[in-house]
Image (tube, grey):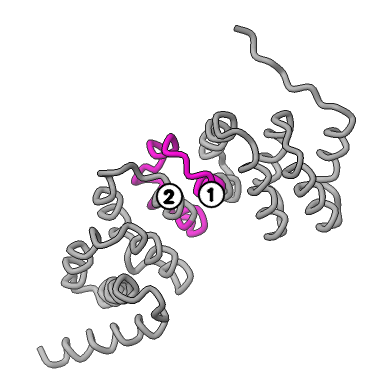
Amino acid sequence: MQEVVPIHTERNTQLIAALAAEAPSTRLKAALTIGTDPDAALLDALVARCGTEPDFYVRDMLTWALTRLPPDLTVPRLLAELESDGSQARSQALHTLSKIGDPRAWPAMTPALLRDPDDEVARAAWRAAEAVVPEGRERDLAETLATQLGRGGREVQLSLSRALVALGAIIEPILQRTLASGDPVVAAHAAATQRLLEDPDAAFEPAVKEAKRIYALGTERS
């Protein structure tokens, strides 16, 4: 069966040009227009722009526009984008997949992707994996995510903790095991995650500081 090539109308041609305009407001308006009246012919243009768009708000609008298209079209295209050499292209594809929440994305959530050396790609992968994990595979995901405890700065650690907490009580024995790892940074991150699990409204940074203090006291006593 021959592939159907999307036909770009004059309107679509203008919108594609607007997505690359110099002014962020023009690009934002174009993405909003596309999402308001979605057209599958603009799928590739939206995905391509996600990989290069410098403005956070425009990227968020591009993601929204993509979620307005049928998942049967967007999910395969976004999964293909995970093979891109560009870290922003990969992270934005993952971010959009997390918003769509289609379980067909689960096979792409490999340990290698969840441990991607680029923090933004990894953070997006954690959110996406939590959003698409099939029932019964939560523990497998939690075990892989737990290998990243202690990684990065505050924002990276908070992203990981939120992804773990979203998996529920299944993470408790994994966190308890990690607390005994002997690494103070990993143990503090695990303890802060445990606190967030028990009290989702708890502040993250004080929890980390308190966990480090308790760990240090315990080390001194031993």
Q: Residue at x 39, y 60 (%)?
A: 163
The residue that disc 2 covers is 131
Where residue 217 sits: x, y (%)? 20, 91
* Mark 1: few/some/many CA within 10 Å (<14, 14-19, 20+): some
Where residue 60 sits: x, y (%)? 66, 55
Cβ–Cβ under 8 Å for marks 1 and 2: yes
- Residue interval drawn in magenta: 94-123
Kind of element beneath mark 1: helix
Q: CA distance from mark 1 to mark 2?
A: 8 Å
Closest to the observer, 35 or 79: 35
In the rendered structure, the answer to whether residue 141 lies left or right of residue 92 reads left
Q: Magenta: predominant secondary structure element? A: helix
Q: Residue at x 49, y 54 (%)?
A: 124
For badge 1, the amino acid type reads Lys
| Disc number for residue 99 | 1
Where residue 186 sits: x, y (%)? 28, 71
